[in-house]
Amino acid sequence: MEFDAVLLPPRRARMIAQGLWHDRTINDDLDACVASCPDKLALTALQVEDGVTTRFTYRQMAQMADRIAVGLARLGVGRNDVVACQLPNWWQFTLTYLACSRLGAVINPLMHIFRERELSFMLKHGAAKVMIVPKTFRGFDFERMVAGLQPGLPDLKQIVVIGGAGSNSFEALLSGPAWEDEPDAQDILARSRPGPDDVTQLIYTSGTTGEPKGVMHSANTTMANIIPYAERLHLGADDVVLMASPMAHQTGFMYGLMMPIMLKAGAVLQDIWEPKQAIALIREEKASFTMASTPFLTDLAKTVAESGSGVPSLRVFLCAGAPIPGPLVEQARQALGAKIVSAWGMSENGAVTLTQLDDDDERSIHTDGCPLPGVEVQVVDVDGQALPSGEVGRLMLRACSNFGGYLQRPRLNGTDADDWFDTGDLARIDARGYIRITGRSKDVIIRGGENIPVVEIESLLYRHPDIAMAAIVAYPDERLGERACAVVVPRPGKSVDLPSIVDFLKAQKVAIQYIPERLVVRDVMPSTPSGKIQKFKLRELLRENAA
């Protein structure tokens, strides 16, 4: 694959001169861990369904990374080849990324909720050469799904199955044989290591254009974010990071996979969110930090309060993805005894703004934090002119962690000649430089931290034989922040109900989390004189009906 990360070269000299890019890769950090603390516990991974826990020291982690890297090379993977990985938070996810980094290959993390519709586009667009999946997870057969897609994916040469019984199993091809001891192993590993500006991650984000966009990141862009993030949160080698947020999102990938290695800290992975299990893990592993969306915080605080089983080691819970309700901050502080930090970020940059540890709780309730070092933000009007504090406008940012661009979509990069990136969000900035996201100019619904691609779902609903007009809008939900409601106008003489819509979208192989959970049927849509649907009126309608 040829990567067009056009946003990286123009700012390299400035980023290096300012000390914001560190010119190292995850290989350098893993090697440093092996040199200084080889027998320290690096990774603990729990598979909730079967109760299996797997552990690696840093020495064992490096050895397995080398083993899998040589195994991938045996499958034809080399520099700039894409390895797609549709896995829960299993140890194989972490080790596959480290192995790709040894080879100069690019990992493409894919959410395990994705099904045929999402995957067929992403795997083809990213030209994935290898796809790694579980045989089954939560009752779904991933091997069968991807095998059905493979004939339409000319670049996909190999499907590797974790827990499979055949010759294509992860165990047989990658993690079982002692590939690192083969005569040519060290030559393979030595000649393939990437540089800090090479693309190391391709991660897809749901947008408003009707198709996902492939975000390209290098070691320099990701590490430029993780280092100040850890410093602001006072995280170091003595910390243990619990990660139950999916590592196929930047939250899990950057702060649950990469950050612990960079800090020489410990990581604990949980593949299925279950608050009682999370409490047990925090207590057993002495986890001190975690990051997740609001529903995770709600569940954890409620379960701790109800069970009376405290989490004394937990020092910080960083909550992002949606505003944190005021009562929840107070409840969580009392139940968990941890500092609740609010934050805002995006796949293109990682976390951009965080509250400070010494801020009062009101800052976490009413703001999304202030910029990390190396980040500038401004709010502008429709003409691009900066607005004074307190006024709402388009949020622009200029960051050392800004991505390299969208794969094969440079026209969508949204970054001007001065490196200002249009986030697509609306916000205000207060007198102290703290931001508050007030809305989205992008038409996206965030359900429990998961972006719902509104335009894509709407376009599918327009194919429904009984629907004349369709719009997807958000309605508030106490636990998930938002859920999706379909507002439709039926064709003359036809009727539509929610079960028929659900069945229709399932037949289109849409991820369950993307399917609307509420339906409103109308005779007409509110619209502008030009015919554009006025979604703000639909949102008002939903709020009035809920009152």
Image: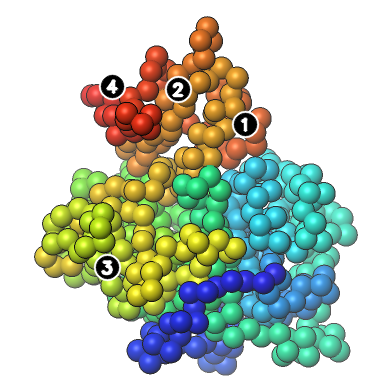
- For image coordinates 64% across by 78% down, the residue present is 101
Image quadrant holding the C terminus, namely top left
Could you classify mark 3 by the number of other residues whose Cα lies within 10 Å: few (under 14), some (14-19), or many (20 or more)? Answer: many
- For image coordinates 69% across by 48% down, the residue present is 120
The residue type indicated by label 2 comes to Val
What is the x, y in percent for residue 80? Answer: 68, 74
* Distance CA(mark 4)–CA(mark 2): 16 Å
Could you classify mark 1 by the number of other residues whose Cα lies within 10 Å: few (under 14), some (14-19), or many (20 or more)? Answer: some
The residue mark sitting in front, 1 or 2, is: 2
**Residue indicated by mark 3:** 377
* Distance CA(mark 1)–CA(mark 2): 18 Å
* Distance CA(mark 3)–CA(mark 1): 40 Å
First-in-chain label (1 vs 2): 2
Q: Tag 4's secondary structure?
A: helix
Q: In the rendered view, does 299 fall on the left or right side of 496?
A: left
The residue mark sitting in front, 3 or 4, is: 3
